[in-house]
Image (cartoon, rainbow, N blue to C red):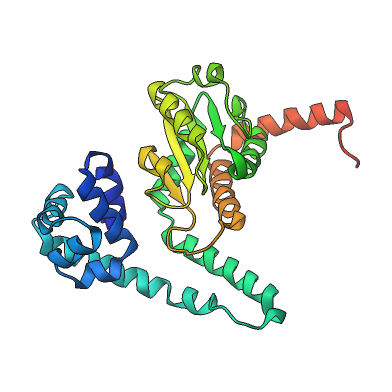
Amino acid sequence: MVEKQLNELIKESFPSLSPGQKKVAEFIKSHMDEGALHTAYQIGKRAGVSETTVIRLAYTLGFTGFSDLQEKIRKDWLEDKHSYTKEVSATAETSDENQLFERVIEHEKSILQQLLQQIRPEELSKTIDCIIRADRVYIGGFGSSYAAAYWLFYSLRQFRENIYLSSPNGFMPEEVSELSEHSIMMVFAFPRYRKETLKLVNLAKKQKATVVAITNRQLSPVGQLADITLTTEEHIESSHNSIASVISLLEVLMAGIQKEDKDRISRRQQKLEQLYADQGLFIE
């Protein structure tokens, strides 16, 4: 069995943590280097809580004590540090404005490289299987997240039926109320996070639908609620989120669906091509 990373353990336990333990958890995720080296007292002081709260977090996450938790922090931190050494050097800023284009491209390359490192195949496989088996697929995205939501909506409509999409500014409760335990909701959420996203997810969970979040980090507001959370820029510090990483992740999902559900997709595309020809939609 694949050993879970600390950020996964934190995500699974996050809703049940006390306010103080949540502060410690978020501090450790954001400052793995300090968590790997500092004492429980020092971490508590930096997080604004007591040493006891840090120790209680360790027990809550399933460790035998703080030293056991810290050993896990060190292991994950060293692995991440090794994975992203090239990324940091590749994205180093330069003051030469003539190299703006090169800097942007290098930054996007580093994001995609990081995406490759953080993707967990089992989570992708689970998402692909849920999409294929679902009776309905509802896709939600508001504001700037709507662009990626529409891309997935249009692409999935080429593969199968019963695909639904929110509007950029809201959703129809009647459509969401038709979801069930056999349905899946794909929801996109990137800063600045919209309140409608949480309303949509909570309504879907009441319908017992599987919720998959595509977001920038595991502990984003929607990431904490989702059954499956796929992240795009967990370790990237940037003033905006890259659409390249989001679309690349979706391309991986689409390729997996096409591989696993090729017979139904073939029938669907033949039907659509006949419809397009009858309507004369394309210049050929």
8 shown above or below 135: below
283 shown above or below 96: above
Q: Closer to the camera, 73 or 17? A: 17
Side of 211 where 13 appears, left or right = left
Give residue 38's position: percent from left, percent from top.
Answer: 19, 71
Q: Closer to the camera, 266 or 64? A: 64
Side of 187 where 19 appears, left or right = left
Residue at 22% from the left image edge and 57% from the top image edge = 48
Count the labels in the image. 0
Give residue 241's position: percent from left, percent from top.
Answer: 56, 56
Give residue 150's position: percent from left, percent from top.
Answer: 65, 38
Residue at 18% from the left image edge and 60% from the top image edge = 44
Q: Is residue 66 visible?
A: yes
Q: Is residue 5 visible?
A: no
Picture quadrant of residue 243: bottom right
Residue at 72% from the left image edge and 81% from the top image edge = 98
> Which image quadrant: the C terminus?
top right
163 shown above or below 88: above
Side of 16 where 162 appears, left or right = right
Residue at 53% from the left image edge and 19% from the top image edge = 173
Give residue 278's position: percent from left, percent from top.
Answer: 87, 26
